[in-house]
Image: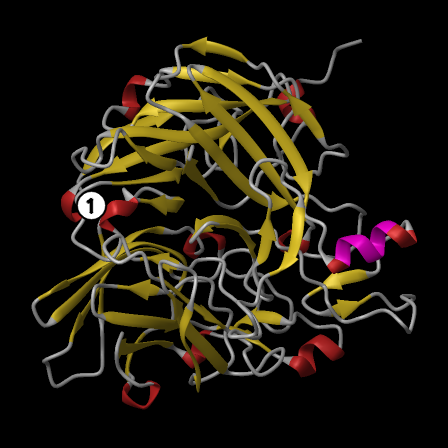
Amino acid sequence: MALLDPIEAAHDNLAPIPMECDAPFLTVVGELPRELNGTLYRNGPNPQFETKGSHWFVGDGMLHAFHIENGRASYRNRWIRTPKFLAEHDAGRALYRGFGQKLPDAPASLGNDSGAANTNIVFHAGRLLALEEGHAPTEIEPRTLKTLGYQNYNGRIGGPFTAHPKIDPVTGEMTFFGYNARGIFSPTISFGAIDSSGIVTRFERFDAPYASMVHDFIVTENHLLFPILPITGSIDRARSGRPPYAWEPDKGSYVGVMKRGGSADDIKWFHAEACYVFHVMNAWEDGERIIADVMQSEEAPLFTHPDGSPTDPAKSNARLCRWTFDLSANTDRFTRTYLDDVTGEFPRIDERHSGLVSTQGWYACDNPAPGASKAFSGITHVGRDGIRLGQYMLPLGDSISEPVFVARGKDAAEGDGWLFAVVWRARQNRSDLAVFNATNVAAGPIALVQLSHRVPAGFHGNWVDAS
């Protein structure tokens, strides 16, 4: 009897893993740079219980921590114990189906908090924060990954908090926003700032043109930009069993531009044809212009039209695109110019240049070769104006996570350092942590940290230097 090809058997790496574990001494193939001392934290959905019909996005958050020190590597993973996780753990079954909705047979006494804390993990002002865009940050103990609970900064912030805050590399200030700020599917956006010592210095709200899923935003030295793009939210759709969030291109695309020290009353709204952007690579100011490099698709991937019909797959692939806003021109339109034809996502930069001019960027990309994984299976390195500087493709069938840049040192030149990415080995059904020379990804990993199990496909991660 012929055996099933392992690649055919394991169609993707989305399924959850059922355990928490510690691996103190991992095998390293190659050599880890001795300058690397710290921890790579990664976050992603790993549902505790199966919920039929639920979107992959809403699975319980699980953290994966790779600690590197003196050329050695260890690993630990833990579920984030949100109120949702604890309620379902005690019940021994799923109680929520995501987007604030309970299952029909959930107990009447069950609360409405369906937060999963499953999207990003950032370190700021001495706090490690697990983030997802619908709820407050969840604080995590860095060494043990113990869940410490919601962090609302002594009541100074309230409501949803983005999974993509921006940390100013000069001042250490963290800016943030939240959509659905006056309740689920409301058009209200909140925004604010937390200084380098962890004190909230600003928290305000304004109404956007319509209720939208706003995954990321844009921050430069002097401006905040809020993209309102037509994945729309509707309470009526949710209540009637139709898609709570859906693609409505007729609403067009809007971007609100506000000075960082200004008022929401002064926002100038720019607009363009419908498109969608999950992630921003970077943005900066060029005189009276703002330049933003983003991963743009012509139609929203992963979501349907309001009637449940799919969007066009040929138009749902994201590519590196430049948005330009001319603040001095007598126009309320912004321009969009694709910089490359490679399908990709999860763009990252040398964060020391966040909001400033940058000349280095990396993102996970597709491999067009026959037999390649349908998930991202390569890394593309780009330079100024999106010029391609290098590219690495995994063996056929394997897939890769978001790449994370780590500088060689605080005074190193832009891009001088390493790139981390978690790789799923499809034939072995396990994962490696791959370490690349960031300026020569085409040469392949300089070191592989090998796990005996797999890390499910996730969203975002960040490196935290050892203190």
The image quarter containing residue 334 is bottom left
Q: Amino acid at mark 1?
A: Gly
Percent position of residue 373, x then y: 52, 31
**As displayed, is residue 238 above or below residue 421?**
below
Q: Quadrant of the N terminus?
A: top right
Is 294 left or right of 301, judged from the image as shown? left
Q: Which residue is mark 1?
A: 386
In this rendered view, identify the residue nearer to me: 359 or 397.
359
Q: Is residue 88 magenta?
A: yes
Q: Nearer the viewer, residue 338 or 201?
A: 201
Which residue occupies 85% across, 69% down? 110
Q: Position of residue 63 (x, y in %)?
A: 61, 40
Element marked by disc 1: helix
Res 330 seen here: yes
- In this rendering, position of residue 239 left or right of residue 122: right
**Residue 374 on the magenta span:** no
User: Which residue is the extreme one toward the left?
Assistant: 287
Residue at 42 percent of width and 62 percent of height = 216
Q: Main secondary structure of the magenta part?
A: helix
Q: Quadrant of the C terminus?
A: top left
Q: Is residue 340 visible?
A: no
Q: Nearer the viewer, residue 409 or 455?
A: 409
Residue 118 placement (x, y as % from top left): 60, 51
Q: Position of residue 151 (x, y in %)?
A: 58, 62
The residues colored magenta run: 84-89
Q: Is residue 327 left or right of residue 265?
A: left
Identify which residue is drawn at 59% across, 25% down. Answer: 75
Reply above or below: 157 against 383. Answer: below
